[in-house]
């Protein structure tokens, strides 16, 4: 049964899609505008991307001021972290983690001003996300995965990082 659950972070939703299984495999509807609208999710998505990573890779923490994202795991298992990156908010720095897998098929809806980061926990993951705005790197902020203001618990000590994610940078 399709479920939409609130999380401890305002406007961040955990979505549990319906999974149909039989002797041939499974079928999962990962997005249906009418179904999502019935649950109050009326976001117009304009771009969809995938990111493929190997075990031990952390991507993020990436945020911007405008974009809603709908995150889905297509292959493997990853540890997803959502962080309130609204520096004007009294809730700045609050975070929550989720484990998304190709078995549970959970999705997370992430509002603007919230950072997204994920750690690949299996040999290969495919991370899929819909966005409500077109990607614009000039409007994105990157916070370091181990930013002490967030005190995020990660199930890894020495992740594989891009230069951008290792250094972090902020866009005003």
Image: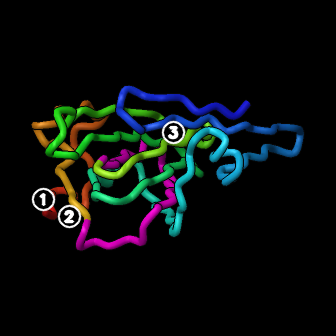
Q: Secondary structure at mark 3?
A: strand
Residue 31 position, x and y percent, is 65, 52
Residue 24 position, x and y percent, is 87, 45
Q: Is residue 32 above or below residue 12?
A: below
In the image, 16: left or right of 159? right
Q: Which residue is label 2 attached to? A: 164
Residue 16 position, x and y percent, is 62, 35
Inspect the magenta stretch and tell me whether residue 137 lies in it. Answer: yes
Q: Which residue is label 1 attached to? A: 167
Dividing the image into 4 quarters, which one contains the C terminus?
A: bottom left
Magenta range: 114-139
Residue 116 position, x and y percent, is 34, 49
The front one of 83 and 152 is: 83
Q: Give the mark count.
A: 3
The reply to whether dot 1 and dot 2 touch (C-beta < 8 Å) is yes
The front one of 46 and 25 is: 46
Q: How are the colours assigned in the image?
A: rainbow
Q: Secondary structure at mark 1?
A: helix
Q: CA distance from mark 1 to mark 2?
A: 5 Å
Q: Residues within 10 Å of mark 3 (few under 14, many from 20)?
A: many
């Amino acid at each position: 049964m399709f479920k939409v659950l609130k999380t401890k972070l305002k406007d961040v939703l955990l979505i549990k899609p319906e999974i149909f299984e039989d002797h041939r495999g499974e079928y999962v509807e990962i997005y249906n505008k009418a179904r999502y609208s019935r649950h109050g999710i009326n976001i117009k998505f304009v771009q969809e991307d995938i990111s493929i990573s190997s075990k031990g890779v952390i991507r993020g923490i990436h945020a911007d001021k405008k974009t809603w994202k709908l995150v889905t795991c297509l292959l493997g298992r990853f540890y997803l972290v959502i962080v309130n990156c609204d520096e004007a908010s009294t809730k700045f720095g609050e975070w929550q983690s989720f484990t998304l897998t190709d078995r549970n098929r959970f999705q997370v809806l992430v509002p603007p001003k919230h950072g997204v980061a994920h750690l690949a926990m299996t040999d290969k993951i495919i991370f899929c996300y819909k966005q409500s705005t077109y990607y614009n790197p000039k409007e994105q902020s990157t916070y370091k995965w181990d930013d002490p203001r967030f005190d995020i618990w990660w199930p890894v000590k020495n992740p594989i990082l891009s230069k951008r994610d290792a250094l972090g940078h902020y866009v005003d």
